[in-house]
Amino acid sequence: MVAHDFGPLGAVNSVIIDRGKFQGVSPNLPVVTSSGVMGRTFRAGLNFSSVLLLSDPNSRIPVVSSESRVKGILSGQGYQKPLALLYVHQNSALDRGELLVTSGLAGIYPKGLPVARVADVLRSEISLFLIVDALPLVDYPNKEEVLILQKGANLKPRNSYGTKQ
């Protein structure tokens, strides 16, 4: 990563990475770390790209809990705030500590990538849905390296001269 755009005054919670169109990066590619999902690319330059972090209010990821298989949409709420798990029905058996993984429904993230852990589950008397907070698995400010996942990557072996065998 090259730069961070964190803080309450930042327009977008993002980071800049040193890979761009020349390296095959395009918008809406998943960005992950060894800990889990960090976000997705939203702007690709020639040699640099911007990554929209999970914490950004514009970020939405369809997820499923790993144990009870409860589905919902994970949404960012801003800098240093927990993520919100939206559209979880009141009668869902969701517990604190459950791991949330990507469901694969949006077509951006493959199924099964770890994203967050449920921190709090509250029942509302005025809503049909639970109020669920989750904590991201990735510690954004302390990450130095990320992995960009590409769809249909050509994995054919190449010889040392860079031509197809």
Image: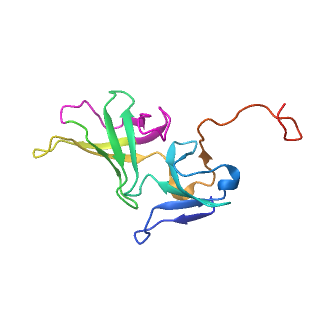
Residue closest to the eye, 128 or 117: 128
State the image quarter where residue 89 is shown.
Answer: top left
| Residue name at image x 49 percent, y 36 percent | 113
| 14 is within the stretch colored magenta | no
Q: Number of numbered discs present? A: 0
- Where residue 155 appears, as percent x and y from the top left, is 71, 33
Foreground: 65 or 109? Answer: 109
Q: Give the range drawn in magenta.
A: 90-116
Residue at the limit of the structure toward the bottom, as seen here: 9
Where residue 115 sits in the image (x, y, percent)? 45, 41
- Quadrant containing the N terminus is bottom right
Residue drawn 47% across the image and 54% down it: 53
What type of secondary structure mainly makes up the magenta span? loop
Q: Residue furthest front?
A: 164
In the rendered structure, does residue 96 fall within the stretch colored magenta?
yes
Pick the residue in front: 163 or 55. 163
Vertical position of residue 74 compared to residue 165: above or below: below
Please give left or right for residue 141 compared with residue 161 in the image: left
- Counting from the top left corner in percent of width and height, residue 14 is at 50, 60
